Amino acid sequence: MAGALGPILSPVTGVIAHEYDVSISKAALPAGYPLLTAGLGAFIAQAWAPILGKRSAYIASTIILFTSTIWDSQVTSYGSLLACRTFQGFGNGAYESIVISSIGDLFFVTPLDCNEV
């Protein structure tokens, strides 16, 4: 869900403009707003993870992404689409920020000792 969140609407910008009767520049906003709120979500997830754990941050982000995906499938107006995509980007924040440290937690690699070479 998180990987294709930003660019998934880019190919259908013209369809969105036609369906909701908005300009092309307004129709491109639902593809950009998730990136803006993902930054805020990443900032919160970075603070949340050391205190409450990465698992809880991932669970909260997944719940936000899942509910907003369902909401996204039921939108009937441009305002609802924009609000949904903005909220969806917030849920993407943990996947943008704490994934690298999670990989480091899973795989422990010892540094190479220069004396052994």
Image: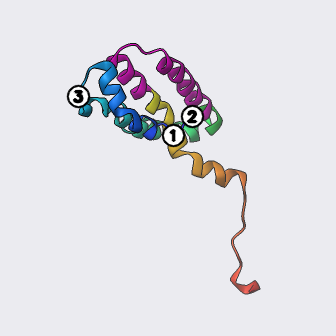
Q: Main secondary structure of the magenta part?
A: helix
Q: Position of residue 103 (x, y in %)?
A: 65, 52
First in residue order: circle 3 vs circle 1: 1
Q: What residue does disc 3 label? A: 23
Within the magenta stretch, is there residue 8?
A: no
Amino acid at the residue labelled 2? Met
Q: Give the residue at x 48% y 36%.
A: 5
Q: Nearer the viewer, residue 108 or 73?
A: 73
How far apart are the two marked residues, 3 and 2, measured between alpha carbons? 27 Å
| Mark carried by residue 1 | 2
Q: Is residue 26 left or right of residue 72?
A: left
Measure how far apart labels 1 and 2 are at the Cα level: 7 Å
User: Residue tagged by mark 1?
Assistant: 4
* Span colored in magenta: 58-87
Q: Is residue 22 visible?
A: yes
- Say few, some or many: other residues with alpha carbon within 10 Å of mark 3 (under 14 / 14 to 19 / 20 or more): few
Picture quadrant of residue 36: top left
